[in-house]
């Protein structure tokens, strides 16, 4: 009997002294100290946030898992529940959805948690209340003529700028906006001298990981409007056209000691006179990867302002004829198609602002150990994306606009070169070619021509000889094929005349960029996406200690039992985040999560599913304003974290004699 009694005593000691032991069935008290935080569970207590916080509470001994709920009611009525999770293994929670701006008296959002132990569920914790409210509005920054500039607001994906005197609201995915509405075709002080504007932040209303607001409570995508700001411009500076600065959150002048831009910059220039000596009222900015200005990577829209800042939702509609041009000198242009625009050597151009939305990186492909996943199939502008099996997918709806950003350039070794050229509106001259291909049959809606380089949509052309001539309007040009507005009434053979009689205005550069850059009218700058910050002296990590307490990391040697929660700072320009973890710092080989190399999230915190051992984790932003296959931003430095086993101790017992 003695050995049996000794075994029972040892087992009892284990249950009583283990930090992860099972609680008795009678345990009913709910978890204590439930609270919110952004980076560390031990930070000062707050009850108001501008971005979705994480949650933590004191662990319950013997908890097998936790159930968490978030609601708009302190009584947690079913129709007030926004979010719930019943599979939490650690006393921390990270939400993967957008919480609405919502305030109450005293609070409008309430969280609660309970533990599931061997004997069943404990009581719910005391509700913790908090509010969601934007902390501040963007504030004006010092700027240049023709350019609005403001302070970036943490966690914002875009900004709405309200031009009060037009009136017009423009959505900008950066912190700069040119004043093209006020300057194009009217550069005098009554139009440009004073610009009144207001601004508000825009955030994404999206979800990830299959979670969404359960009660479908609306979450507006914008914050409150700022006060009315007033920007004053000096008179238009005439003289030789030249670049002045590259402007975003920083201002650079083309020096190798300049900092890199974290956001897509604006390009500021002055003057209106090119090499030929003629005054111009329109300009175009180009960006290249080489100092010879041959490898073009960004094509600016035609504008009349002394600054150019790319917009995601398209350029201004330029007048198509002389009458419309005269009207434009007394009105504000709307947004839309710029028509036919060309380089000085007649290359047809499409501004980057007019490109379609790129493929969006909303899920990760299933790949063993891939470190650079490729984007998935693009989402349509109005339909949420479908989660890819085996990955944490993000649901996106709405048109996010053209990819008006640039790749990182490894500044200062690598960088970009930009220049500005004058542009003129040109009445197309008469142009003549002949019918090509196999000719054109009766009823055809297109005509193949021998030379199509001189034609543009809107051109009026005559087709045929004197005996069968007819007049049509060109609707589109595809290579050497002219699409026409009305079906042909006559057949036309190869070699018959095709003559343009009149046409729309075209907009043509007056100078070649390579010659402009060779003359010295060129400025260099660097672009480097902002990495997230995952540590500040100690990692932004919280969770269950091996001894069963809720702790935050105190240094690189800190360890956690189970799945810790890690947090990071929002990166300027990031729409989502990619999280990975590896058993080695170098080479960093990410572990698979559901068959993918890490996961995507919209939150600025995440719970890492770590097994016992030493790990390294890293985070990078994803920017949907970058081109396809280039939407990943810079990684944070790999940060060490230890997942430990629970600590057990055995109470010794003495044998009876």
Image (cartoon, rainbow, N blue to C red):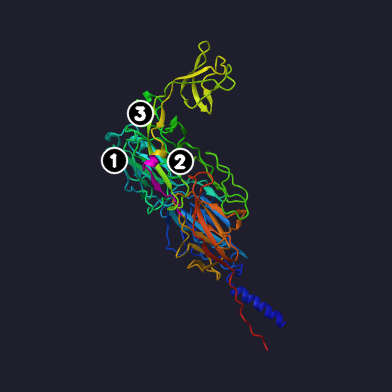
Image quarter hosting the C terminus: bottom right
Q: CA distance from mark 2 to mark 3?
A: 33 Å
- The mark that comes first in sequence, 3 or 1, is 1
Position of 601 relative to 421 (above/below): below
Q: Mark 2 or mark 1: name the one nearer the start of the chain.
A: 1
Label placed on residue 294: 2
* Magenta-span inclusion, residue 529: yes
The image shows residue 80 at horizontal and vertical percentages of 51, 50
Q: How many discs appear?
A: 3
Which is more toward the observer, 102 or 494?
Answer: 494
In this view, the mark in front (2 or 3): 2
In front: 565, or 430? 430
Please tell me in which quadrant of the rendered image residue 192 appears: top left
Rendered-image quadrant of the N terminus: bottom right
Q: How far, Cα to Cα, is label 3 from label 1?
A: 21 Å
Q: Secondary structure at mark 3?
A: helix
| Residue under label 3 | 328
Q: Is the residue 536 above or below the residue 492 in the image?
A: below
Magenta span contains residue 412: no
Callout 1: SS: loop
Q: Are marks 2 and 1 in contact (CB under 8 Å)?
A: no
Q: Earlier in the sequence, mark 2 or mark 3?
A: 2
Relative placement, left or right, of 208 versus 503 is right
In the picture of the structure, the residue carrying the numbered disc 1 is: 233
Q: Is residue 134 visible?
A: yes
Depth check, mark 2 against mark 1: the one in front is: 2
Residue 88 percent coordinates (x, y) = 57, 59
Foreground pick, 609 / 376:
376
What's the distance in space between the residues labelled 2 and 1, CA to CA? 34 Å
Magenta-drawn segment: 516-530
């Amino acid at each position: 009997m003695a050995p049996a009694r000794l075994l029972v005593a040892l087992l009892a000691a284990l249950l009583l002294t283990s930090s992860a032991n099972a609680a008795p069935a009678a345990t009913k008290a709910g978890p204590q100290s439930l609270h919110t935080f952004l980076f560390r569970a031990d930070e000062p207590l707050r009850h108001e946030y501008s971005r979705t916080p994480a949650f933590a509470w004191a662990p319950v001994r013997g908890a097998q898992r936790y159930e968490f709920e978030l609601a708009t009611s302190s009584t947690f009525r079913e129709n007030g529940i926004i979010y719930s999770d019943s599979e939490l293994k650690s006393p921390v929670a990270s939400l993967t959805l957008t919480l609405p701006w919502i305030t109450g008296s005293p609070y409008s959002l309430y969280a609660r948690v309970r533990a599931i132990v061997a004997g069943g569920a404990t009581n719910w914790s005391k509700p913790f209340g908090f509010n969601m409210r934007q902390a501040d509005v963007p504030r004006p920054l010092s700027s240049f003529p023709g350019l609005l500039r403001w302070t970036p607001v943490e966690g914002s994906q875009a900004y709405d700028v309200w031009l009060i005197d037009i009136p017009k609201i423009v959505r900008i995915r950066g912190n700069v906006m040119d004043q093209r509405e006020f300057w194009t075709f009217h550069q005098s002080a009554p139009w440009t001298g004073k610009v009144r504007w207001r601004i508000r932040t825009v955030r994404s209303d999206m979800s990830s990981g299959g979670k969404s607001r359960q009660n479908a409570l609306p979450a507006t995508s914008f914050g409150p409007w700022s006060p009315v700001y007033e920007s004053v411009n000096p008179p238009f500076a005439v003289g030789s056209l030249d670049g002045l600065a590259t402007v975003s959150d920083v201002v650079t002048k083309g020096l190798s000691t300049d900092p890199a831009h974290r956001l897509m910059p604006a390009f500021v220039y002055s003057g209106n006179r090119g090499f030929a000596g003629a005054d111009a009222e329109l300009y175009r900015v180009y960006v290249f990867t080489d100092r010879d200005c041959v490898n073009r990577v960004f094509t600016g829209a035609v504008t009349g302002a002394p600054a150019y800042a790319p917009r995601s939702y398209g350029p201004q509609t330029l007048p198509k004829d002389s009458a419309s041009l005269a009207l434009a000198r007394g009105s504000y242009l709307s947004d839309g198609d710029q028509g036919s625009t060309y380089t000085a050597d007649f290359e047809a151009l499409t501004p980057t602002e007019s490109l379609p939305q790129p493929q969006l990186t909303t899920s990760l492909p299933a790949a063993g150990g891939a470190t650079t996943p490729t984007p998935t199939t693009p989402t349509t502008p109005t339909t949420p994306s479908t989660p890819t099996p085996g990955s944490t997918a993000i649901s996106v709806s709405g048109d996010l606009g053209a990819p008006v950003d640039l790749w990182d350039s490894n500044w200062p070794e690598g960088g970009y070169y930009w220049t500005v050229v004058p542009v003129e509106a040109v009445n197309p001259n008469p142009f003549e070619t002949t019918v090509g291909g196999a000719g054109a049959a009766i009823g055809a809606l297109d005509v193949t021509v021998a030379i199509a380089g001189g034609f543009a949509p809107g051109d009026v052309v005559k087709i045929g000889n004197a005996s069968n001539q007819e007049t049509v309007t060109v609707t589109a040009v595809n290579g050497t094929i002219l699409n026409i507005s009305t079906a042909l009434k006559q057949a036309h053979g190869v070699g018959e005349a095709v003559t343009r009689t009149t046409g729309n205005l075209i907009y043509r550069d007056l100078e070649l960029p390579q010659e402009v850059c060779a003359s010295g009218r060129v400025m260099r700058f660097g672009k480097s996406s902002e990495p997230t910050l995952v540590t500040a002296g100690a990692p932004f990590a919280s969770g269950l200690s091996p001894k069963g307490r809720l702790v935050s990391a105190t240094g690189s040697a800190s360890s956690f039992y189970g799945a810790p929660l890690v947090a990071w700072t929002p990166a300027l320009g990031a729409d989502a985040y990619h999280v990975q973890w590896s058993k080695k710092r170098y080479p960093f080989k990410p572990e698979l999560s559901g068959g993918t190399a890490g996961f995507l999230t919209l939150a600025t915190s995440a719970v890492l599913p770590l097994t016992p051992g030493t790990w390294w984790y890293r985070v990078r932003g994803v920017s949907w304003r970058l081109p396809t296959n280039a939407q990943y931003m810079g990684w944070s430095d790999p940060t060490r974290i230890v997942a430990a086993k629970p600590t057990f101790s055995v109470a010794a017992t003495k044998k009876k004699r």
